[in-house]
Image (spheres, coloured by chain):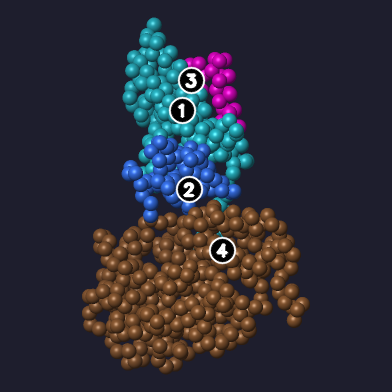
Chain colours: A blue, B brown, C cyan
Amino acid sequence: MTKQDVLAVDRIRCDGHGVCAELVPELIELDDWGYPIIGNAPIPDAIRAHARRAVSSCPALALRLGVPE
Amino acid sequence: MSGISLLAGPDRNGPERFSDHMARLGPLPPDAPSLIDVLDRSGLRGCGGAAFPVAAKWRAVAAQHSGERVIVVNGAEGEPLSRKDRLLMQVRPHLVLDGAMLAAETLRAERVFLYLGAEHTGAVRAMTGALQERSETDRRRTRLVTAPVGYVSGEESAAVHFINDGVALPTTTPPRPYQRGVGGRPTLIQNVETLAHVAMIARFGADWFRQLGRSGSTGTALLTVSGAVAAQTVIEVPQGVTLAEVVDAVGGTSARASAVLLGGYFGGWIAAEQAWDLHVDAASLKTGGHTLGCGVLAVLAASRCGVIESSRILTYLGDQSARQCGPCVFGLRAIADAVHSVAARRADANDIARVRRWAGVLGGRGACHHPDGAFGLLHSALRVFAAEFSAHLERGRCTLDARAAAA
Amino acid sequence: MGDTILWYTTRGAGAVSIVLLSVVVVLGLLARIRFATERWPRFLSAALHRDLALMTIVFVALHVVTAVVDPFTHLGLVAATVPFGSYYRTFWLGLGTISLELIMAIVVTSLVRQRICPRLWRGIHWLAYAAWPFGVLHGFGTGTDAFSLWLLAITIVCIGAVVGTALWRVIAAPRDPLRGERRAAAAGAS
């Protein structure tokens, strides 16, 4: 994992479970319908473990960690 | 100002036959190894809406490591206000096919797909007929497929998705089609007009194409002009001319104009006074925050309400969503409903506040750019029709009522 | 007297396995229902489900290993791995073997979930609806304690919890909010 990793969501797989927003609220919040709003900033070291956990906990496997496009 | 390059030549009442096409333009040059360099020098950009430099796109496909490439000729034309692609296919199908075959040879593709709208029967007939007139090689490697016409069906990943799985809806990228597309292979998807330009550039050269443009722009463009104009038509213009010149060329406006919709539903509104001096040129439009999109130029008469028109467009865009992503399905629909309330003068200040809030989180949150396009349209409407929006909201009246009363 | 310790361990681990398996199924259903309260965030159901599933494997393994190595039972590896491969209470034991193998498939596919096709993962996971009842029936059919009061009561509670939660899921689980939309759009675009 590199320093520039960001969280990205597969918008088609995402079903609005909202587990990601619970696990890493510093980076993800939910819109009026429960779908994630994710910033583009790189992930701070302190919460990288939380971000990784959010990725593996997504029930729809829609969240991933990767380099920004 | 018609028939400069693509639409040049006689008889636009039916598809040009292969024999006439060859007699008029001559054969393609025998080999095209450096075609990509020629396209690079010509400055040709894609005509499907994104205006991406064509040479760069072909190079990206060529650079992929897996063996076989695929060419997809995109003639789906999902934008309702656009008719240029259909017209081009109906009168100059062989230009499109020439371009497709050139792409296939240059990129060493063994399969070519013609991706058309099922309801566009004229274009389908013309391309089917034209394909029959081509050589055995061309016919063997080309397949014509038709998908139900929809706003998102012409999106690149939707075209690939349809050819792969029969569903014309966008997919998540990455990977992009140039990396993995039809059958998992690097795929070039190019608009029919772009390929027609390629066919002309291959014959007459990059310099010839460049000098067709005006004011430093290169080449020509097909525009669909509609709305409050003397003649609603498709016209070919040199790039670089002003919008005023374009409208003059179709006979001028038929009524006083308040605004112009440039780029189709994926583009945006521009106040008429600012619009006329804009140049038909991707780069210069971009610096002004506008886009030529797929070449749609629709003139709004001052007697029509911009709020009502925008509401209609947003409702249409909401209905046309591929409905795969929550933010697009719910966010876009909510925005369309709220703007509809404003248009019907049933809204309150909260509605506009909500619209702004939702619009703020709509961008970049879909698998494709559909919600972004809708957001762009909304944003331009709120700007250009600010007075009309206030009138609808605060006084429950349309500015048209005042004008009618004053008249 | 035989190796009573092994025998007791087999029975005890078996009972714990049924309880754990039932809790795991309930948690999985809660996750599917998107159950959440102020004190019970959504991620908790899935996280506990996963952790307890791994714990279940431990107890099932203990149950099976002690049963196989116990000389008193004359059960060999075949009985533990081949369904209906044992001479002793063939049918009921076989259900247990099947249940074990289904659980293994579910756990293994879940561990490599990120790397396999989502539909395959989901299909295998649905086998839980077979793994759980087979485990319970195996307990009734082979467990010496099966009808002793304490284990009967525990088992009834487990069955009640699973069936109740499953009914809740059938009646009230939120559907994917876009499911109807996606089908309609896909139909229109085909």
Q: Give a yes or no on whether discs 3 and 4 share a subunit.
A: no
Q: Which residue is mark 2?
A: A38
Q: CA distance from mark 4 to mark 1?
A: 51 Å
Q: Residue at x 23, y 75 (%)?
A: B34
Secondary structure beneath label 4? helix
Mark 4 crowdedness (10 Å alpha carbons): few <14, some 14-19, many ≥20: some
Asked if the magenta segment contains residue C157, the reply would be yes
- Residue at the spot x=38%, y=19% of the render? C67
Q: Is residue B92 above or below residue B156?
A: below
Secondary structure type for disc 2: strand
Residue C54 lies left or right of residue B264; in this view the side is left
Nearer the observer, C74 or C178: C178
Is residue B226 visible to the viewer in this orientation of the structure?
yes
Tell whether position B168 is magenta.
Answer: no
- For disc 3, the chain is C
Seen at 52% across and 60% down, the residue is B371
For discs 2 and 3, the disc positioned in front in the rendered view: 2
Residue depicted at x 49% and y 44% = A28
- Residue stretch in magenta: C139-164
Judge by depth and name the residue closer to the eye, B9 or B307. B307
Q: Position of residue B75 (x, y in %)?
A: 44, 74
